[in-house]
Amino acid sequence: MSTPAIEVRDLRKSYDDVIALDDLNLHIPAGSFFGLLGPNGAGKTTFIETLVGLVRADAGSAAVFGHDVETEYRAARDAVGLAPQEFNVDRFFPIHEVLAHKAGYHGYGREKARERATQALEQVGLLQKRDQRFSALSGGMKRRVVLARALVTDPDLLILDEPTAGVDVQLRRELWDTVTALNESGTTILLTTHYIEEAERLCDEVAIMNRGRVVETATPEALMRRGTDRITVTLRDPPATAPAVEAGGDRVRSVKMDDDRLVVVATEGGLVAPDLVRELDRRGFEFVDLDVSRTSLEEVFVELTDSGNGDLGDDADTATDSGRREPRTAETPATDGGR
Amino acid sequence: MSTGSSTTQVATLARREILRFIRRPYNTFLPPIVTNTLYFSVFGIILGSRIGSVAGVSYIQFVLPGLVVLGAISDAFENASFSVFHGRWEDYIDEVTTAPMTHRGMVGAYVFASAVRGLLTAVLIVGVGLVFTAAPVTHPFHLVGFLVVTVVLFAGLGVVGGLAATDFDNLTVMNQFILRPLVFFGAVFYSLDVLPPLWRNISLLNPMVYMVDGVRYGMIGVTEIDPNISLAVLTGAALAVLAINLVLFRRGFGLTK
């Protein structure tokens, strides 16, 4: 069994009366694409900053590729490339030099550091801006510089804290492609995000954090299977009361009429729907339309964290006014092809 | 993942720090030239011609070493405190603190770069002084020794200030209410011999007195305190401040949450 990329045991951190990390335990395998989800204040950024020495834990231990972040901090930090949520880039120098300095801080000689800086800027499509200062760049470009700075040291573990916050859809997809390629080449990725779609689309495994603890760890698919889907069948001659439905067996949670529509709530609705259609057809019901609204990871997330709408849906293209993303229908694929 | 050396890491940070001020000549080099031209004009020529000689040399030659120390320590302190605090204020110091660099290396690079700035300022002030008077070097080893120890000490104090400050106003306060009084009562513009015994003894508690006296000894050969004792005390003070810097970095004072 290979050394995990991150191993955290009973990590604890408080700020006065606020407990940011509450005996956090987490195991992130090397080579994985791991998502960390949680509402604001869940402790995600505190956890990440503990790994690179920006936060000192009160108790517990954390190791990066087997190196304790306190006692073997140099080896641990050398393995990590961090793209933080907040822009914290040296504004005195052009971005190429900023990146070369960062590479130098990790021990790359001057020429090699410059080469690494050039490669990293190429990787994020900003080479033509190499002589610009950070403050002269657009918001999306700034986000890319932060990613390039994380990449310039060729890290084994790339930590992305809300990497696509505030960037447009096209850039978001470019960033997804970049980090997916890195992961496929062996880099472990730890991603925190508000965009649940990102986690669904990119991650092998996700952990949901709430109030400084991990409340669940699973694959996105496994988590979504825990949620309930909604099958809506529009009938030509709807009955006054909902018919008894045998299709789906234990998966079916409820059956009710809503005007001319039969609404069946069930787990794994995609499996229940065909049986339901056959049963209704056999029993002489004529139907006009069928719609399956699949559960989303976001809905499972909200259930697990009980956070309501406070922290999700910062972006209009993924959220409704209520902060919950519009449920997908059978006609709307879950992703644009996945990873 | 890199495989580079600690030397490369520290050299990169020191280089970054030096480039930061070298590339801003109007901020770095022009102010000491203008300020010291004014000092030499007023204290050296206008007032100096009325004062005559002090400790056996012309007044302008007497104040030259003091002005060298004044400029060097001010710039060493301000450079270190600004650089560390600005990095904290804008959070880009994280680029350094999240790197696999030793704490000793971080302290060394910040102090070295600021000490270099202090020494460059000292050279500039001597250059300006040469326009007005001769700048003899009577004891070169003492001159270099005192200047190096002095700028290291104040660069180290600047690092402490940069870590402790919570606002830019704090830096101004440190400069106005701590550094300047020490400088102006540090025998830059007068000889200790003109003071009554009580004030002379009180003045000896001011570390600036030893720095100015030591550099004065190195340049014009005039001293009021044994220069070797002064150098030893100042070296001890510089090492103590460096040790404090190291402890603060290790503990993440002002750097970690």
Image: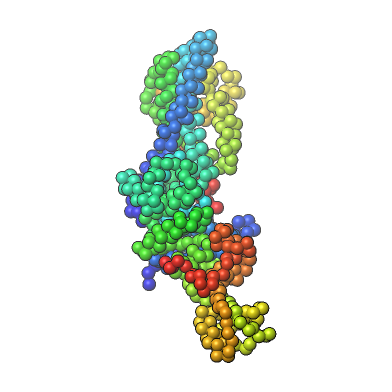
Q: Is residue A289 above or below residue B69?
A: below
Point out residue A49 in the picture as x, y percentages from the top left corner: 50, 56
Residue at the left extreme, as displayed: A111
Quadrant (top left/top right/bottom left/bottom right) for the N terminus of chain A? bottom left
Point out residue B82 in the picture as x, y percentages from the top left corner: 51, 37
Residue at the right extreme, as displayed: A240
Q: How is the rendered protein coloured? A: rainbow
Q: Is residue A70 visible?
A: no
Residue under the point 36% across and 51% down: A122
Residue under the point 45% across and 13% down: B57
Quadrant (top left/top right/bottom left/bottom right) for the C terminus of chain A? bottom left
| Image quarter of residue A174 | bottom left
| Total count of labels | 0
| Image quarter of residue A28 | bottom left
Q: Is residue A138 above or below residue A332?
A: above
Residue in front for this viewpoint, A252 or B127: A252
Q: Is residue B121 above or below residue A73?
A: above
Point out residue A32 in the picture as x, y percentages from the top left corner: 42, 67
Residue under the point 55% across and 52% down: B257
Residue in front for this viewpoint, A24 or A67: A24
Residue under the point 48% across and 57% down: A169
